[in-house]
Image (spheres, rainbow, N blue to C red):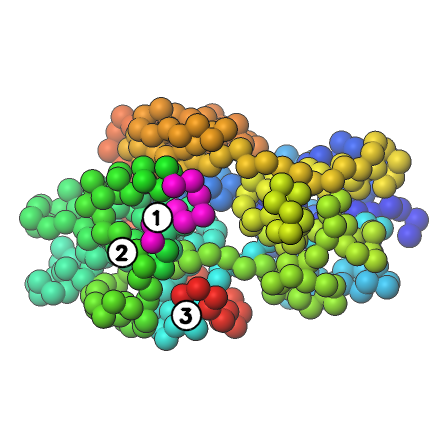
Amino acid sequence: MAQQRIVIIGAGFAGFHCARRLIRRVPAGTEVMLINTTDHFLYLPLLPQVSGGLLDPPRIAVSLTATLPKARLVLGSADAVDLDGRTVAYKDLEGATREVGYDRLVLAAGSVNKLLPIPGIADHAHGFRGIPEALYLHDHLIRQIEQADAADDPGERDARLTFVVVGAGYTGTEVAAYGQLLTRSVIAAHPRLAAAHARWLLIDTADHVLPGLDTRLSRTAARVLSRRGMELRMKTSVKEATGDGVHLSDGDFVASRTLVWCVGVRPDPFLEKLGLPTDKGRVVVDEYLTVPDHPEIYACGDAAAVPDLTRPGQVTAMTAQHAQRQGVLAARNIAASYGRGHRRPYKHHDLGFTVGLGRGAAAANPLHLPLAGPIAAAVTSGYHLLALPANRIRVTADWLLGSLMRRQAVQLGLLGAASVPLETDKPDVPENV
């Protein structure tokens, strides 16, 4: 090729931050190309606040063309990679197949919903991976309350006011927390429901909320949610989902019209079609983020099984924290391959986590210092503002207005259930159900 070209597949945390750093480091005349299905980087940690009605979707959708002006954006979905010919085949948004060559390739395709072979899940549950799902859930919660208000049958009313979230990890906990506050606010505006209340259940097979995180975060989150009346059904799983509710592993049947699936994610199935070595669907790389026998190919984020040098023998977790830092390092090491600087191995110690619970509550352990209450909420908000690449003033304004004014809760009717299917590929075989 006459022109050097670096192709990045995916613009999530890893791909976006890789491109952002690369455009400042690569030699003149080297093209940085992003292949992505949307024209924005989505700041996922604040997505539960969109479904909860606190933030408008554009606040957390960061324009790729505005923030990466020196990169070339190609809207489409990568379909195949010719490793010998060094080309990427992709389908554009109109379905046409196109091809582009590369000098360096970054695999940052991210992840998709993790499914389990449970009857009815694909038909009756909805995931939580992007703005369409958040908008749908926001409308759905309001719709259930409005239909409960119109219902004459007490059983139907109770079912519509019962909301089930499966998965008590980071995402599920926040979705349940913000969703509960939204439904409480909407119900208060319906006089016929004055004696009713929204029933929320958070279900997980683990024995505590936020499994895998600091136990102090778990205790704080569990305490806040329990005080709000949320039912924490731990050591419990879903046996079957139906249009009328869910059958649980403890024998209980919960009548409900709402089932939110936040069990977790798995690497994009596209990665397993490349002919590269994988580990549980993630592309195997060395500590420099390069693929064995293919030094021109890098992988990072959820797409990569990166050796965790802080925990020998293990790979890094699929978190935004790792993805962002790996994207930055991939850019540095790619620049080094062009003679600009020196490459470095990936080694990152966990700096702690923050979990927003809404209404001045949060659980946080920055630098492993446990915090709760308003202080934790302030730290959580501050962290998100620092990590958000753009729109900080708008997000802050929404937060301030939300604390001073009653939220407006209306259905926009933009998306139906068919527009946000949970099933993206064949269900996974359960590991610990």
Q: Residues within 10 Å of mark 1 (few under 14, many from 20)?
A: many
Residue 246 in the image: above or below residue 199: below
In the picture of the structure, the residue carrying the numbered disc 2 is 233
On the question of residue 428 being in view, the answer is: yes
**169 and 26: which one is in front?**
169
Between marks 1 and 3 in the image, the one whose residue lies nearer the viewer? 1
Determine whether the residue tagged by mark 2 lies in a helix, strand or loop: strand
Determine whether the residue tagged by mark 3 lies in a helix, strand or loop: helix
Horizontal and vertical percent position of residue 195: 7, 48
Query: Label 2, label 1: how many angstroms apart (C-alpha)?
Result: 9 Å
Horizontal and vertical percent position of residue 158: 14, 59
**429 and 418: which one is in front?**
429
Query: Label 1, label 3: how many angstroms apart (C-alpha)?
Result: 24 Å
In the picture of the structure, the residue carrying the numbered disc 1 is 209
**389 and 207: which one is in front?**
207
- Sequence-wise, which precedes: disc 2 or disc 3? 3
Quarter holding residue 420: bottom left
* First to last magenta residue range: 207-215
**Prevailing SS of the magenta stretch:** loop
* Type of the residue with mark 2: Arg
In the picture of the structure, the residue carrying the numbered disc 3 is 122
**116 and 359: which one is in front?**
116
User: Is residue 319 in the magenta section?
Assistant: no
Horizontal and vertical percent position of residue 214: 42, 40
Q: Residue at x 8, y 62 (%)?
A: 154
- Sequence-wise, which precedes: disc 1 or disc 3? 3
Q: Residue at x 14, y 49 (%)?
A: 197
* Type of the residue with mark 1: Val
Q: Residue at x 71, y 35 (%)?
A: 21
Q: Do the numbered discs 2 and 1 sit on residues whose CB atoms are within 8 Å? A: no
* Type of the residue with mark 3: Ala
